[in-house]
Image (cartoon, helix red, strand yellow):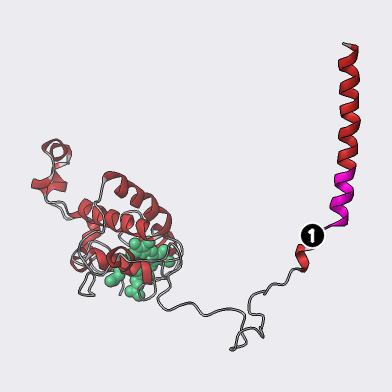
Amino acid sequence: MRIDFTVAATLRVAGVALLLLALAVLTACRQDMHDQPKYIPLRPSEFFTDGRSARPIPEGTVARGHLNEDTLFYTGKGPDGKPADTFPFPVTREIILRGQQRFNIYCTPCHDRTGSGEGMIVRRGYRRPPTYHSDRLRHVTNGYLYDVITNGFGAMPDYAAQIPPADRWAIVSYVRALQLSQQAPLNELPAAARSQLPPSSRVVISPAIRQEGGAK
Ligand code: HEC
């Protein structure tokens, strides 16, 4: 017992001495990394003949994660350069629900929750967008809707910065769902849903459709 104790004490003294030595050595040989030779952005250089430290990017270089090879996904355009009428990925229930959530955040202030164009800021004086339920907008392609979100349209600002491509497509799928919700042919409804409709709504065209086109 006693011997053990002495050994432990000796080791401790040795440890402290080592630590002090290490500190002394480290202080003496401090690495001045903040003084290292390096170029800060746009600083001139005598090393390269063009006098610039920044080297030109080799032709064809693509930043990691920015290949954007899938033209349909990123631009909404097909191989012919025209807005495509397909989706770049299969549309599932999850995607439509995601689209609904994004639509309600980003689009309803102007287009309102049904897409008829009566959003809150429109009621307070912003230019009234056309309803989505006009014949014209029901027949535009998915790629066209994607393009409107990406690049804006007339008085409508673009949402490229706020909404990433996958969410733009999700919103497009939801706009399609909204359009269907106002125009579904009666015979395409499941029988159970059909019987829930009040008799009058089976013949009356929804008010949203009558506001064709909105203020243009
Ligand atoms: C700040 C208000 C505002 C927001 C938010 C907004 N829009 Fe619009 N949108 C407009 C206006 C205004 C127009 C009509 C522009 C014009 O004709 O000059 C329009 C037009 C449109 C059109 C019709 C284009 C055409 O061919 O007539 C579509 C489709 C559309 N918006 C989709 C969207 C979607 C999807 C979102 C959400 C990502 C959105 N908008 C968000 C104001 C808005």
Reply above or below: 212 against 17: below
Residue 4 forms part of the magenta stretch = no
Q: Nearer the viewer, residue 40 or 155?
A: 40
Q: Residue furthest top?
A: 1
Q: Quadrant of the C terminus?
A: bottom left
Q: Is residue 82 left or right of residue 100?
A: left
Residue count near mark 1 (Cα–Cα under 10 Å), binned few <14, some 14–19, many ≥20: few
Q: Nearer the viewer, residue 85 or 45?
A: 45
Label 1: state its secondary structure: loop
Residue 15 % position (x, y) = 86, 34
Instruction: Please name the residue shown 59% across and 88% down the image.
Output: 49
Res. 53 image quadrant: bottom right
Magenta-drawn segment: 21-30
Q: Is residue 167 left or right of residue 181?
A: right
Residue 140 % position (x, y) = 21, 67
Q: Within the displayed image, which quadrant is ligand 1 positioned in?
A: bottom left
- Residue type (three-letter) at the residue carrying disc 1: Gln
Instruction: Please name the residue shown 43% across and 62% down the image.
Output: 65
Instruction: Please name the residue shown 29% across and 68% down the image.
Output: 71
Evaluate whether residue 83 shows in this view.
yes
Residue, disc 1 = 31
| Magenta segment, prevailing SS (helix, strand or loop) | helix
Q: Nearer the viewer, residue 83 or 63?
A: 63
Residue 61 % position (x, y) = 43, 73
Residue 153 % position (x, y) = 35, 73
